[in-house]
Amino acid sequence: MPIITGRKNVLAVYEDAAKKGWVIPCICSENLTTTEAILMAASEFAAEKGYDRIPITLAITNQYDHRSQSVFYTHTRYWAVGLALFRASIEILAEVFPNVDILIHLDHAQHDTDADLLDSDLSMFSSVMYDASTLPMEENIRKTKAYVERKGDELLIEGACDEIVDATGEARCEITDADKCERYMRETGVDIVVANLGTEHRASGQDLHYYYDAARAIKAKIGPRICLHGTSSVSNDQIAKLFDDGICKVNIWTALERDSAPALTEWTVKNVAKCGGAKLEQKLIDEGYLTASSKTGDKTDLQHFTTAARQEIVFGEMKKIVRGYLDLWYK
Ligand SMILES: [Zn+2]
């Protein structure tokens, strides 16, 4: 079965990864192009490195205030439609990539707005992040514990003892204390805990600092059961040895979108006449956005003006980004 579900099977994937010293990337997607780029990158990596199969986690957020990815998965902007399309696309693609063990994760599921979804049939998912991190600690523990009691037999549950800071906000959050993290895990019974280790969500740059020493202090208390969020905000060399720090899972999204956008933008500008026609090219020259020397006078061209052409650029870039993470964590 290329899609891994059921608590026992999922735990076996994590145990196997731990034996190899691998950190399983959990990559969010809000469109088919991203979903395919993740799977294709994983499949090509496995084939190239001579592995029979490798695990990868595909994830999606639902009614998460900061980014509701199921809503973006469909132009109807209905999350239930988006979730169904996400699920269907993975089920179909799983047949095409038999060398990839696919785990499906529901990320940042909100204890309040996603309550109905959280208590519905989650058999398509291998894990869920129960996100009550906006609540005070005691309330967070109480609600998370109750959820683990309801659903913990079915799938892996990830809890957050601290909120990961949002790059767009003013809020600052303490780096997670190891004792607090140990207490949270013991009292809630979650399988994996999200700690604030200095990274940020949705960051526009890679200039933050990842506190590996804080991670190691947590690892000493709870073992290698930490999930890291917000890795797009730090450079790859800082996160090359995550397994040693007790990280077993890394949730990623921003880097894929942020770092593929420049390639598409550059390609569009350099091919402006082929994408938008000579008239648009002249208009942009007249308005000062382009120079007269950049004028080609090219006609619009099917290989350039289609949605498929634009998606191909994004797909190729995203695949490279995912490959970068696999090279980093599957050694
Ligand atoms: Zn996150």
Image (tube, rainbow, N blue to C red):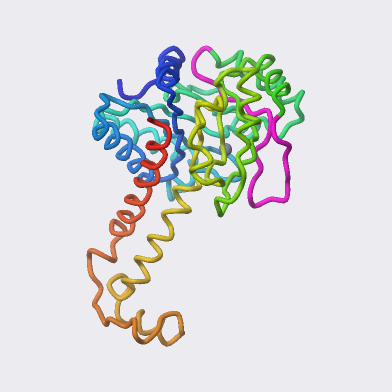
Whole-percent x, y for residue 194 in the image? 61, 29
Visible residue check, residue 146:
no
Lateral position of residue 211 relative to residue 271, left or right: right
User: Does the segment drawn in magenta span residue 80?
Assistant: no
Rendering quarter of residue 40:
top left
**Image spot of residue 282 (x, y percent):** 36, 84
- Residue 262's place in the image compared with 106, above or below, is below
Residue in the foreground of this view, choosing between 300 and 73: 300
- Number of marks present in the image shown: 0
Q: Main secondary structure of the magenta part?
A: loop
Kindly identify the residue that appears in the image at 45 percent across and 80 percent down: 289
Q: Quadrant of the N terminus?
A: top left
Q: Which residues are magenta?
A: 153-176
Q: Quadrant of ligand 1?
A: top right
Residue 307 % position (x, y)? 31, 58
Question: Residue 166 lies in magenta, yes or no?
Answer: yes
Q: On the rendered image, what quadrant is the C terminus found in?
A: top left
Residue 127: x and y, percent? 49, 24
Asked if residue 147 is positioned above or below residue 132 in the image, the reply reads above
Q: Residue at x 49, y 18 (%)?
A: 155
x 55%, y 50%: residue = 206
Q: Quadrant of residue 57?
A: top left
Q: Is residue 25 visible?
A: yes
Q: Give above or below for 83 relative to 157.
A: below
